[in-house]
Every structure is written in C-alpha cells, then in structure tokens.
Amino acid sequence: MGMAQRNLTLGWVAAILLLQMTMAERPSWTLNGRPQVFMDLTPFEMEMVHNFLMGRKELELQPSKTPTLAKNSVYLMEMLLPDKKDVLDFLDKGKRMPVREARVVIFFGAQEPSNVTEFAVGPLPLPIYMRIISPGPWSHPSWASRPISKAEYSLIHQTLKKATEPLHQFFLDTTYYSLKDCDKDCLTFTYVAPHGTKPGQRRSWFILQRYMADNSLQPTGLEILLYHGSTNVQHWKVEQVWYNGKCYNSPEELAQKYASGEVSPLVIMESLTMDTEQPQLSSLYKTPEECTPGVAESHLPPPYNVEDNTVYYRDWIFSFRLRPSSGLQILNVHFQGVRIAYELSVQNAVAQFGGHISEGIQTKYLDVGWGPDNVTHQLVGGIDCPDTATFLEVIHHYDTDIPVYNPQALCLFEIPAGMSNKHYFNSNAEKGGHVLVLRTISSVHHYDYIWDFIFYPNGTMESKMQARVLVHATFYQPKKKSYISQSHMHLFSNNHTHLVHYRIDLDVAGRRNNFHTLKIIEKDITKGLRHCEIQKTLKQTNYSQEHQAAFHFGKPLPKYLLFSNLHNTHSGHRNSYRLKIYSKIHQVQLPGWQKNRGLSWTRYSLAVTKYRDTERCSSSIYSQNNPWNPPIVLENFIQNSSNIEDKDLVAWVTVGFHNVPHSEDSANMTTPKNSVGFVVQPFNFPVF
Ligand SMILES: *[C@@H]1O[C@H](CO)[C@@H](O)[C@H](O)[C@H]1NC(C)=O
Ligand SMILES: *[C@@H]1O[C@H](CO)[C@@H](O)[C@H](O)[C@H]1NC(C)=O
Ligand SMILES: *[C@@H]1O[C@H](CO)[C@@H](O)[C@H](O)[C@H]1NC(C)=O
Ligand SMILES: *[C@@H]1O[C@H](CO)[C@@H](O)[C@H](O)[C@H]1NC(C)=O
Ligand SMILES: *[C@@H]1O[C@H](CO)[C@@H](O)[C@H](O)[C@H]1NC(C)=O
Ligand SMILES: *[C@@H]1O[C@H](CO)[C@@H](O)[C@H](O)[C@H]1NC(C)=O
Ligand SMILES: CC(=O)N[C@H]1CO[C@H](CO)[C@@H](O)[C@@H]1O
C-alpha cells in the first residue's frame, strides 16, 4: 500500500471513529429525529397544505400570481411552532409529539370588506382541519396593513407607467432615460414605506430613478404619490407629483407646465454610475480578509454535523430556522448537555431616514414584510462566507403557489476565535480555540443586513448584525442641507438610524430563572485616612416585576445583566448567564417614531418579561404598513407587569447605530463599525 493510499485509509478510519463518537455522545432527546419538531415545512407538507386549501371550495382560492387584487389567495405558509411546554415535554419527558401545524396567511380580496386572516392548518403532513389564529392576542391585522404582494407590485408598475405617459418627452429631455420603449436606459420606481401616514391608508410615494448598468439607482428629482388602496385598480390614482422642490397635481400638469416653460428642469447630464468606480447594489465588495477568514484550515470532515436543521458542533447542539416572516431563529441550544436557551432570534430591523422632502421624512423601512425575494440573499462562497463553509438551502412558500428553493441562503463555518470578533467588538483575539458561525444575509433596498450567530468553545454565544449599505439617496435640495449630506452632485444621502430587535429566551439549566443585575459602586472611604481611597463594591439588584426590568433607551444599563437558575446550584454558586449588549446608540433621538405602537420595541434597550405562548414575536408582517396599530405591540407585553421571579424569562433587546453619510462614502458604506448585537456568556457556571 503506497503512502498516499495509507493516509487516505487512515483518514477514513479517523472520520468513521469521529462520527461514531459523536453519535454515542448524543443525548437521548436528539434520537429518532425528535429535533425535527423545530423543522420548517417540507416541500411535501407545503404541497399537502396547498392541496387541502385548494380543496376547500368555500375559500374560493385563486393562484397568487393572478394579476388582480380582488381575489382570495394564500400569501404565506410556514411552520407554526407548537407551544413551548408541549415541545419540552416531548423532548425532555418523552411525551407525545406535538401536532405539526402550518401557519397560513390568506388574503381575502374577493369579498367586501376584504380581510387578511391567519389559519393554523393541521395535522401535517395530511391536514384535515383549519382554524383561525391571530398573529397577536389583541387584534386582527387590517386589510390595509397587509404586505404588498408581487401581483400588487406589478399592477403598481403598470399604473405608474401609464400615468406618466404624458411625461415621456420630459423624461428624455431631463434624464435621457424613459419608461417607454427603453432597453438599458430605463427609468424605474422605488417605493418608500410605510404606505401611508395613518392607519387604513395605502398611498405611497414612488421615487423615479435611473437604473444604472451596475445595478445602482440614481434619483431623477421626480416623486409620485399613488393611491392604491382599492382592490379595483381602476380606482387607483396619482394624487401628487413632486419635482425639483415643487408639487403638481398630476403628471399632465407637470407635462403642460414643462412644455410652456414654467418648470425649471434639472438636467442630469453626467452618467454618474456608468464608470467602474461605482458601487454595486449587492454586497460583493467586502475586503478579502473580512470574507475568507480561516480558509487556511480545512477539516475533513468538518467539525460539525448538520442533520435536517439541527447542528452538532463540539459541545454545542442547536436547531435553526430561517422564518420567511421575520428572520433567523436559533432554537433549543444545548452546551455540554445543558439547555442554555430555548430561542434566540431576530425580530425586526428598522431604518429611519432623516430628511425633509416627501419621501425622505416618512421613510421607515422594516426588515420584515417586504416579500419573499428580500428575505434571503444567495450567499457567495469566498465573498459572503468562506469557500469552505457549508451552504444550506431553505424552502419557503411566500407569495407563491409552489415551494420555492433558496439555495445557499445560510452558511455555516468554523473560524479561529479571534477572527469573528476582531473587527467588530474590539475584544482581544483569543488564543487558540475556534468558533462556529451561522450566517444569513437579507437585502432590503439599499442595504444588506448580515446576521451571524456565533458559538464559542467556552459556552459563550454571540449574535451580531452588520449592515452593508448603499446610501439611501433623495434628490438634492439646498435648503435641506441640515438633514442630508452631499454625496454626489444632485445626489444627496439621508443620514439614518438602524435599530435591530432580538428575542432571547434563555433557559439557564432549566425553565425557571431569576433576573438580577450587578452594578459597580464606588464608595469614598477616605474618612480617617490621609490619602483618598475609593472602594469598589458590587451592588446586586433583584427584579421581581416586568416593569422594573424594562430599561428605557437613554437610561444606562447596569454592567452585569444576569439570568440565574436558583435550583441548580453548585458549591454555593448559582448557574448564571450574563447578557452583554453591544449597541452604538444609547439614545434614540427620534421620539416621533417611538410613539408608533408597532415600533414600541424601540423604546427599550432591554425588557425582561415572563414567557407567554402569545408573545413569541415583537413584530409581524403587518408592522411595516401599519406601525400605528399593528396586531403585535411589545409595550403590551409589560403592561400588566407580571412577576418575574423564578419564572420562564424572555429578554427583548434593542441595539442600533447611526449613519451620517459623508461624501467620501459615495454611495456605499460597508464598514465593520456598523455592527451591533449581544453576547450571552456563562457566569459562575460550574457545570462547564
Ligand atoms: C375574513 O373573511 C373570511 C372569509 O370570508 C372569514 O372566514 C374570516 O372570519 C374573516 N376574518 C376576519 C378576521 O374577520
Ligand atoms: C425585493 O426584491 C425584489 C425582487 O428582487 C426587488 O425588485 C425589490 O426592489 C426588493 N424590495 C426591497 C425593498 O428591497
Ligand atoms: C441626522 O443627523 C442629525 C444631525 O447630526 C441628527 O440630529 C438626526 O437625528 C439624524 N437623523 C437620523 C435619522 O439619524
Ligand atoms: C436577591 O436575591 C438573592 C437570591 O434570592 C438574595 O440572596 C439576595 O439577598 C437578594 N438581594 C436583594 C438586594 O434583595
Ligand atoms: C391585563 O390584565 C387585564 C385584567 O386581567 C386583562 O384584561 C388584559 O387583557 C391584560 N392585558 C394584557 C396586555 O395582557
Ligand atoms: C469565552 O470566550 C469569549 C470569547 O472568546 C470571551 O470573551 C469570554 O470572556 C469567555 N467567557 C468565559 C466565561 O470564559
Ligand atoms: C465607490 C466607493 O466609495 N466604494 C467604496 C465602498 O466601500 C469600500 C469599503 O469601505 C471602499 O473600499 C470602496 O472604495
């Protein structure tokens, strides 16, 4: 046997041994496919649910792509997680497996009044029933708050194209681009959100932009307000046109005034984005060292196993899900056989743009509720994730009639411990040790959000968000200089604030935990001494009520935020986990938008609440278009201020950063300094 061949054989033996070892070490709850309780719907289940619903003639369902809004159709289908108690009883006590159900969102547009209703459909895989569920315990979503479907987008585009026909010559003269008979030199519309300024409205501003060869967009100075609230497209109407600082009642009026010389046009001569220096819309401009850390090390086999949606990595076991309705969710996290957390998840991300003009001022993009194409971004090996990463596909049923496969939606990779932290949190690179990273990227308009969950060898877990952004540009208006900074001639960028909300359902060595904090107190004990002497002591505060444990933005957080298990004590120490929050914002300067009930999570940097099955999310797909009165409102979770001593606790965490664009940013900002998140780490955890 040649040398090379023998090495190969040994390699195989080692791999098999390793595999057997990991199998043998697995706790019993992981056997017989039980972690599948956290698995998203399979394509087969989706088809079965779809067939079941189509078979219910009274629903009068039509395909989602039928080009009308006056129809009933399925908008979204995803796995409905069973109640926590049932899941834990099943995993830990060997009780019956909870019934598998799908959550289905149906738009009933064919009826008067139209509504949007959510159903639980089960049991899977062969459903026989459906029952109405409500996304939040307080109210049903309104029809006007539903997300915009692909069918609606396409109707909007047709309507705008038709409505702006009188402006054809104007477009050609001022931009050299048009909407009609164009090929590369086409104008395009970008919409802003929310779609209205009060509940029930569905009228949106659309920014007319030049679509450049490199995928970037250049505003032309024209914005159009369209009413699209009716299910009958004939009733839609352009309500206002804004051009270069002036308002017009209709495209016809602008065209007429232009023809008669009453409009001072801004001619965009220079082809700003045609040259190669220009940024790209997607995220493909990271520096190589940021993208491919640790590629030098290649493992055979990789040090982790992925089975369905459960990851086995050294001392860690966890499941994951990329929910189309919100984002990445990590479930049932175990370290060295001890459950640390039931869930860690991304709830929402919001970008608030400053500025004065029509579209700039009201823009509040939420990361959820944009539609299927924006939830997942196909990750590129060597750019978004190391080449050696494991890429994972997710399958969604979102604004579609069949399951849609999103290849490379997630990636999983191991890197040396220091790498992941180096750029972001300024902590010292650890000696030795590796960490596992699970990553996904979502793209909304001008920016990509990179979401990472990181698992350290010592029981520490981190969640981090970085934004890679194309600056949101509104048209240059000299008098608005205080809000926007110049980034090109005619192209101004609004400064903006990004906030992210997380749900952290820690179960430190059991469901019942306490929340307490430690503060460092400096005591002057100079009295009687010659020299000045300051003594540092730790002051412990116990929290017994939800309202005490709700920390408003702007109020400094105690240094140590601790979740402890009172029952599992080891040599006098309680098992505790410490929560560290990394935010670049400690004060939200825009009180206006915190008033919105749907954004009430932005009022608290941290809120600790008692677990309730009805409080699984802080946002929904309806928050974007109805931030005023959505079905889910975080503020309500703490309204009654329950007792939180020795209870199942959930921490709601808000982090964020400001971005004030500089002209040097040109049209991009892809900076590690824009990264925020949280860390949970063992604190007096003698088990490990
Ligand atoms: C919406 O309409 C459907 C079908 O007519 C009906 O079954 C459902 O109860 C309505 N939902 C709400 C929340 O009113
Ligand atoms: C969502 O994705 C679609 C299709 O890629 C795109 O046209 C649209 O602009 C995206 N929306 C946002 C808000 O990014
Ligand atoms: C924009 O910048 C101004 C001045 O720095 C600041 O007052 C304002 O809050 C910022 N707006 C946003 C949305 O960050
Ligand atoms: C907080 O709770 C711990 C454990 O229950 C107890 O030992 C301690 O005395 C309490 N501290 C205060 C300030 O109430
Ligand atoms: C608060 O408690 C009252 C009375 O028990 C109840 O009616 C109400 O629904 C509760 N509110 C919330 C937000 O849980
Ligand atoms: C675990 O590792 C992280 C990152 O390497 C480090 O910041 C932290 O202090 C460590 N935690 C403990 C409890 O040792
Ligand atoms: C056009 C432009 O300014 N591109 C910049 C985008 O950001 C990266 C990273 O900071 C820079 O290297 C590019 O020059």
Image: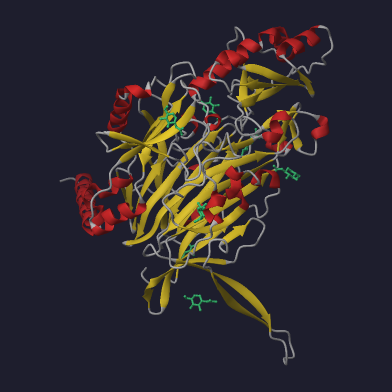
Question: Residue visible at 60% across and 15% down?
Answer: 235
Can I make out residue 185 in this image? no
State left or right for residue 297 relative to residue 203: left
Q: Nearer the viewer, residue 117 or 623?
A: 117
Is the residue 556 above or below the residue 79 in the image? below
How many dots with numbers?
0
Quadrant of residue 250 within the rendered picture: top right
Residue 650: image x %, image y %? 47, 57
Is the residue 383 above or below the residue 580 in the image? above
State left or right for residue 586 relative to residue 463: right
State left or right for residue 375 relative to residue 209: left
Ligand 3: quadrant of the figure? top right
Residue 396: image x %, image y %? 39, 32
Residue 384: image x %, image y %? 48, 39
Q: Nearer the viewer, residue 527 or 513?
A: 513
- Coloration mode: secondary structure
Quadrant of residue 167 within the rendered picture: top right
Can I make out residue 411 in this image? yes
Question: Residue visible at 40% across and 65% down?
Answer: 512
Question: Residue visible at 33% across and 59% down?
Answer: 315
Q: Nearer the viewer, residue 509 or 424?
A: 509
Looking at this view, name the residue that lies furthest to the left. Answer: 1
